[in-house]
């Protein structure tokens, strides 16, 4: 037996390397025994009486050392080279794997193959849902797929405040001053708020990413997979459909040729605002077809330019007056006169028969024989919900209201929800409905996001909507506001604070639903009274401010607040209670309409 410690003290540098690798007694000790430096025993004089034996011993030992040492050095170097080569290969491979791993941005796919939350559509409802999901699940990874090339933005200023801006670069900045003078952007959040799409699966705390300019063309509901127009496939755990709607066109214009189509604006998006703003500076006449919210707002906005730039603005529609489908006739007529005072040539009871190019202008022929010459047409005749995905997804479309049919929790399938303009939902107070307003998009989107994270809450909230005819006249409404329903109006003299401008100064926001969207009065107490039912105001009266109640089976189902602001929680409570009221004069007092 040889002591390893003794052997190691006499090892050459090469041997020590080998010994450090592993101590192998069978081979290494024998080799080490012959490679030790000559000791006194090896350099003795040899056996007495045999001359030259020491020399022979040295020759034998030397040959042995030389041969064995050469073999050992060769073997050691070879093994070390193999270990070195193996080590370099391992390091190189790991480096290449690191470079090609998903954590390296350069190797990440442009679009993730899977996302936990997929939101189809890039409008208000989708953004509200994304915020709601992240509020309940701070680490959630949310992907918004939007046809629009722009990041999520609010639509109301496109037909309101942006047109009243004095900034010559407003079409580029898309910033505007609210009626209260405060400035803001139409975008909900700046680009820095969002996570790059390719980084979404890898960011530590999740986030919201927006894939702009892409359209979902197919849904495999059973496989939880969607297909984009470019062939990309994305799987998901939970999905929201918030595809919104597309502006309707008139059949008479659809039948016209390309020359007419090229002079037509279907107003909906940022690009439509930019285009129409530019056109309004270049042509002499613009005709707006449609007397609803959008048509009347655009008429007032362009009418302002009619006075300052000599632009002719014409508005025509089949109803008797502006907002004729919403407001009672007397208030609709008053609104029409208001729009005319803004510089607009309003033509009620006008039904378009045909449109053609005559010379260098457009010729609009009406069914009653009247003719209108103009340079450009804006069609504002309603919205068609985008339900193309219903076929591939096997989702139900409501035959009466249009839109994807969902339950009270806005759910179409176990892992699919719908919100915004495209949702036909069950209102637990007013029945099945489909609503096309900003506040509904906010509220339904938020609720869908909550339910996608397990809230299981029904849609009970009565969303509101508002319309401003410039900074001095506006109204807010809630519930079913249909001029075909019986209405009762209670009016009072307006004061300087009864304007949209004053309302935004009090609330601090031009998008009024942001300050009122969740509020509801806790209690509504109406004192008994024997006052007579309010009478319909006489033609020509100045409707400074007031409340219009819409009745169905003697129950208030809708309310319009005319130049009365920041009172929506009371209106919401009245509709939610669903009670009959003997005296609506007393109900109107809840809104403090007689305050000076």
Image: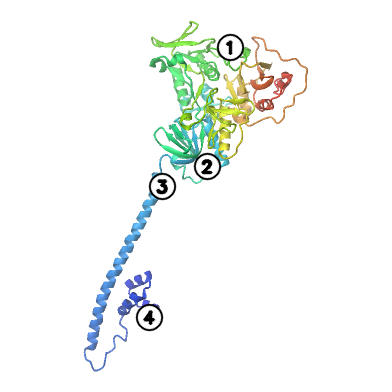
Asked which secondary structure carries label 3, the reply is loop
Q: Report the Cα–Cα distance between label 1 and label 2.
A: 52 Å
Q: Are marks 4 and 2 in contact (CB under 8 Å)?
A: no
Q: Residue furthest left?
A: 52
Total labels: the figure holds 4
Q: Earlier in the sequence, mark 4 or mark 2?
A: 4
Q: Are marks 3 and 2 in contact (CB under 8 Å)?
A: no
Residue name at image x 48 percent, y 6 percent: 370
Q: Report the Cα–Cα distance between label 4 and label 2.
A: 67 Å
**Mark 1 highlights which residue?**
337
In the displayed structure image, the side of residue 355 where residue 453 appears, left or right: right
Name the disc covering residue 140, or none: 2
Residue name at image x 56 percent, y 40 percent: 453
Asked which secondary structure carries label 2, the reply is loop
Q: Earlier in the sequence, mark 1 or mark 2?
A: 2
In this rendering, is residue 124 above or below 278?
below
Residue 492 shows in this picture? no
Q: Earlier in the sequence, mark 4 or mark 3?
A: 4
Within 10 Å of the Cα at label 4, are there few (<14), some (14-19), or many (20+) other Cα atoms?
few
Task: Estimate the x, y position of residue 176 in percent, counting from the top left.
Answer: 52, 26
Within 10 Å of the Cα at label 1, are there few (<14), some (14-19), or many (20+) other Cα atoms?
some
**Mark 3 highlights which residue?**
104
Asked which secondary structure carries label 4, the reply is loop
Name the disc covering residue 174, or none: none
Task: Estimate the x, y position of residue 513 in percent, counting from the top left.
Answer: 60, 28
């Amino acid at each position: 037996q040889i002591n390893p410690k003794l052997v190691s003290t006499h090892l050459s540098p090469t041997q020590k390397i080998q010994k450090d690798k592993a101590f192998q007694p069978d081979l290494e000790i024998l080799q080490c025994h012959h490679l030790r430096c000559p000791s006194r025993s090896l350099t003795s004089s040899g056996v007495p009486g045999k001359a030259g034996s020491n020399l022979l011993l040295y020759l034998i030992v030397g040959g042995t050392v030389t041969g064995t040492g050469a073999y050992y050095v060769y073997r050691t170097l070879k093994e070390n080279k193999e270990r070195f080569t193996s080590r370099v290969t391992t390091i190189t491979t790991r480096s290449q794997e690191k470079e090609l791993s998903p954590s390296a941005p350069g190797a990440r796919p442009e679009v993730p193959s899977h996302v936990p939350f997929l939101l189809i559509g890039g409008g208000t409802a989708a953004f509200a849902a994304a915020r709601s999901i992240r509020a309940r699940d701070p680490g959630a990874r949310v992907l918004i797929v939007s046809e629009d090339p722009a990041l999520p933005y609010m639509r109301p200023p496109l037909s309101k405040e942006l047109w009243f801006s004095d900034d010559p670069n407003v079409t580029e900045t898309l910033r505007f001053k609210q009626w209260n003078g405060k400035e803001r952007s139409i975008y909900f959040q700046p680009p820095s708020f969002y996570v790059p799409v390719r980084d979404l699966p890898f960011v530590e705390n999740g986030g919201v990413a927006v894939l702009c300019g892409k359209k979902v063309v197919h849904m495999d509901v059973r496989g939880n997979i969607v297909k984009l127009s470019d062939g990309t496939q994305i799987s998901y755990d939970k999905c929201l459909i918030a595809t919104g709607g597309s502006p309707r066109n008139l059949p008479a214009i659809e039948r016209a040729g390309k020359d007419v189509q090229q002079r037509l604006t279907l107003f909906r998006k940022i690009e439509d605002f930019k285009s129409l703003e530019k056109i309004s500076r270049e042509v002499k006449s613009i005709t707006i077809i449609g007397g609803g919210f959008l048509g009347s707002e655009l008429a007032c906005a362009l009418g302002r330019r009619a006075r300052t730039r000599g632009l002719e603005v014409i508005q025509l529609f089949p109803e008797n007056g502006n907002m004729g489908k919403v407001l009672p006739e007397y208030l609709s007529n008053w609104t029409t006169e208001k729009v005319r005072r803004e510089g607009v040539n309003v033509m009620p009871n006008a039904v378009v028969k045909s449109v053609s190019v005559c010379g260098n202008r457009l010729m609009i022929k009406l069914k009653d024989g009247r003719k209108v010459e103009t340079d450009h047409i804006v069609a504002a005749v309603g919205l068609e919900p985008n339900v193309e995905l219903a076929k591939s997804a096997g989702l139900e479309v409501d035959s009466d209201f249009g839109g994807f049919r969902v339950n009270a929790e806005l759910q179409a399938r176990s892992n699919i929800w719908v919100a915004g303009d495209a949702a036909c939902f069950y209102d637990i107070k007013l029945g099945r409905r489909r609503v096309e307003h900003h506040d509904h998009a906010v509220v339904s989107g938020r609720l869908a996001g909550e339910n996608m994270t397990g809230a299981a809450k029904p849609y009970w909230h009565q969303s509101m909507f508002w319309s401003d005819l410039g900074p001095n006249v506006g109204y807010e409404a809630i519930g079913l506001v249909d001029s075909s329903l019986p209405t009762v109006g209670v009016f009072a003299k307006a004061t300087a604070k009864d304007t949209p401008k004053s309302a935004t100064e009090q609330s601090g926001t031009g998008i009024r639903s942001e300050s009122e969207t969740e509020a509801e009065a806790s209690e509504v107490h109406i004192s008994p009274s024997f006052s007579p039912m309010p009478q319909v105001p006489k033609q020509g009266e100045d409707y400074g401010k007031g409340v219009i109640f819409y009745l169905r089976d003697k129950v208030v189902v809708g309310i319009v607040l005319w130049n009365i602001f920041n009172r929506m929680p009371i209106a919401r409570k009245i509709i939610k209670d669903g009670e009959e009221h003997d005296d609506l004069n007393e109900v109107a007092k809840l809104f403090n309409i007689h305050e000076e």
